[in-house]
């Protein structure tokens, strides 16, 4: 790479640009040219986003089939929750680490974890190895915050909008194609075919790993060169990471146990739940009083929009992951749709939301406002939330760590949403199912002592098991089946009530955002020197 010496000379990513200084009225301006490595890196980033979203969809769409294959469908919610917990723990920590070690090999390592995790999941032989595979796979989500920043770094300013559009298109395609692929694989009831999707994910993560390794070559940052390994470790907020990750995990464990017919007075629920809440409160106090430069860097909260957006993006995550977890399941259980039909409905709903999201984005740009469109997005459930809006409340030199916080914040909302709504679902079902079935079949002459066996047979969806029940008639079977559907409908209804309440709260919080009209400018990201790094992505 050749550069003409000048007072403004610096190091630019080799994968992205060749810089030639040409005369300009305001001084020397770099002319940026795109190379083959730029295209490789851009495609790899798009593949990474595509793979991550596809894995998220599969963690819900294939959860019942894969866990049921190993005889423990009660742990289905954990596949999605594991992804969110790793995202919460990893993104803020790596948001700090990229300034100290650089981003390239961190991204390569996390992408490689996606390969290993997908292979383990695809070859799982029991529920333990299945969840272990998802734990390894979830490490790939720890670098999700870097993807948009890489696009802004490797592309010249005039092409950056195109790069970000490509990532968003990849997200939309991943949601739709992932849902349809999962539905098609298990449509005939063959749960073993869930493995095929994870072979597919293995290929996606493999392409991403090699693409980033060979196509993305960012400049070395100042702290990479000047700090020792021990000094770098000291700069990371280990205490904050341990508090929030362990606290959220215990919180979710307590809520998951509450959905398994265990009384809230039981120590099995109270111990992890109270410990989790205490650790989360401890994390907040530690970041507020003891660590001004930690995960929740105090400089980020100078603008009220930032704090509001943290809440908004968490509520957005709660709404999305509730939809991801329960929409297809409801179609299968209540309406009798097969896996393909249920996935098609999910894909159509998400496609409508994506189209609306594009319209809202254009509206925001045209009229220079964020408050009203974000609030509207919540009420329609278009999942706009705080994604992207936080950039108007972020100091330019802190875009990377802010992106990490918001990625983690969305995962916090998702993890809490899945745990809360799963508890609502299981508790309602366990209380309503015996009552409704008894009310339906006992008046028809069915023995009350045989109700537990009848309910078990009905839930197994096995016609042979139901017909094997003593003194059962077609009338009793029909009445019992309707009662089961009614109990499930009540359970799903409560999850949507809960999600709607949180979405309404998100809409209300959005109304307190300040419209940063003056910050809607034609300026894009720039590479600028800072004391902490060779270059940062800013405005």
Image (spheres, rainbow, N blue to C red):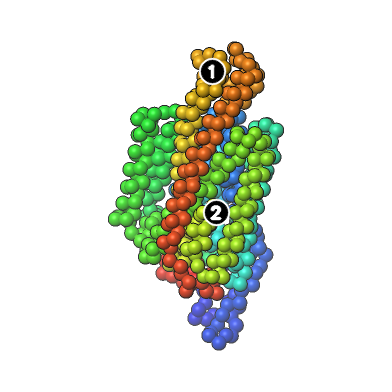
In this figure, which residue is indicated by the disc labeled 1?
443
In this figure, which residue is indicated by the disc labeled 2?
380
**Image spot of residue 434 (x, y percent):** 50, 24
Tell me the quadrant of the picture where the N terminus can be found. bottom right
- Residue ID at (46%, 28%): 431
Alpha carbon separation for disc pair 2 and 1? 44 Å
Q: Single out the residue that lies furthest toward the left.
A: 289
Element on which disc 2 rests: helix
- Relative depth, front residue between 305 and 400: 305
Judged left or right of residue 488, residue 310 is left
**Image spot of residue 392 (x, y percent):** 46, 66
- Residue ID at (64%, 52%): 351
Q: Single out the residue that lies furthest toward the top.
A: 470
Q: Is residue 356 visible?
A: yes
Residue 321's disc number: none
**Image spot of residue 249 (x, y percent):** 42, 41
* Classed neighbour count for the residue bearing mark 2: other residues with Cα under 10 Å, few (<14), some (14–19), many (≥20): some
- Relative depth, front residue between 6 and 516: 516
**Image spot of residue 117 (x, y percent):** 57, 42
Judged left or right of residue 289, residue 493 is right
- Relative depth, front residue between 476 and 86: 476
Q: Quadrant of residue 290?
A: bottom left
């Amino acid at each position: 790479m050749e550069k003409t010496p000048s007072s403004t000379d610096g190091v630019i990513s080799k994968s992205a640009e060749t810089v030639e200084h040409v005369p300009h009225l305001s001084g020397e301006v770099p002319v940026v040219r795109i190379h083959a490595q730029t295209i490789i890196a851009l495609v790899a980033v798009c593949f990474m986003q595509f793979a991550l979203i596809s894995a998220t969809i599969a963690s819900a769409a294939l959860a019942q089939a894969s866990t049921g294959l190993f005889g423990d469908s009660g742990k289905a919610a954990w596949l999605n929750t594991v992804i969110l917990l790793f995202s919460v723990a990893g993104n803020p920590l790596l948001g700090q680490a990229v300034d100290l070690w650089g981003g390239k090999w961190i991204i390569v390592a996390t992408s490689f974890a996606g390969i290993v995790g997908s292979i383990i999941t695809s070859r799982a032989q029991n529920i333990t190895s299945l969840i272990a595979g998802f734990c390894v796979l979830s490490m790939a989500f720890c670098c999700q915050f870097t993807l948009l920043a890489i696009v802004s770094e490797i592309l010249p300013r005039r092409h950056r909008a195109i790069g970000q559009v490509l990532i968003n298109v990849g997200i939309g395609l991943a949601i739709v194609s992932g849902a349809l692929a999962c539905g098609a694989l298990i449509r005939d009831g063959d749960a073993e075919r869930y493995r095929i999707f994870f072979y597919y994910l293995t290929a996606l993560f493999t392409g991403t790993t090699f693409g980033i390794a060979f196509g993305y070559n960012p400049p070395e940052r100042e702290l990479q060169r000047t700090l020792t390994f021990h000094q770098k470790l000291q700069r990371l907020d280990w205490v904050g990471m341990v508090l929030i990750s362990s606290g959220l995990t215990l919180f979710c464990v307590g809520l998951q146990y509450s959905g398994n017919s265990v009384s809230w007075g039981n120590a099995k629920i109270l111990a992890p739940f109270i410990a989790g809440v205490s650790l989360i409160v401890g994390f907040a106090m530690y970041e507020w009083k003891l660590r001004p430069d930690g995960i929740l860097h105090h400089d980020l909260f100078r603008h009220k929009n930032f704090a509001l957006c943290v809440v908004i993006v968490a509520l957005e995550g709660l709404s999305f992951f509730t939809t991801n977890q329960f929409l297809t399941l409801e179609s299968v259980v209540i309406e009798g749709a097969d896996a393909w039909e249920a996935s098609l409905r999910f894909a159509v709903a998400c496609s409508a939301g994506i189209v609306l999201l594009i319209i809202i984005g254009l509206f925001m740009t045209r009229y220079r406002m964020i408050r009203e469109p974000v609030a509207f997005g919540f009420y329609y459930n278009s999942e706009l939330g705080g994604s992207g809006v936080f950039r108007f409340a972020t100091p330019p030199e802190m875009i990377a760590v802010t992106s990490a916080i918001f990625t983690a914040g969305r995962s916090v909302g998702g993890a809490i949403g899945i745990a809360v709504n799963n508890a609502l679902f299981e508790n309602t079902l366990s209380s309503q199912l015996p009552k409704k079935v008894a009310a339906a079949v006992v008046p028809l002459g069915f023995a009350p002592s045989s109700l537990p066996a009848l309910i078990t047979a009905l839930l197994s969806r096995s016609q042979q098991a139901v017909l094997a029940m003593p003194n059962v008639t077609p009338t009793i079977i029909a009445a019992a089946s309707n009662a089961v559907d009614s109990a499930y409908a009540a359970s799903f209804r409560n999850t949507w009530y809960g999600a709607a309440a949180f979405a309404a709260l998100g809409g209300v919080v959005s109304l307190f955002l300040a419209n940063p009209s003056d910050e809607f400018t034609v300026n894009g990201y720039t590479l600028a020197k800072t004391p902490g790094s060779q270059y940062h992505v800013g405005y």
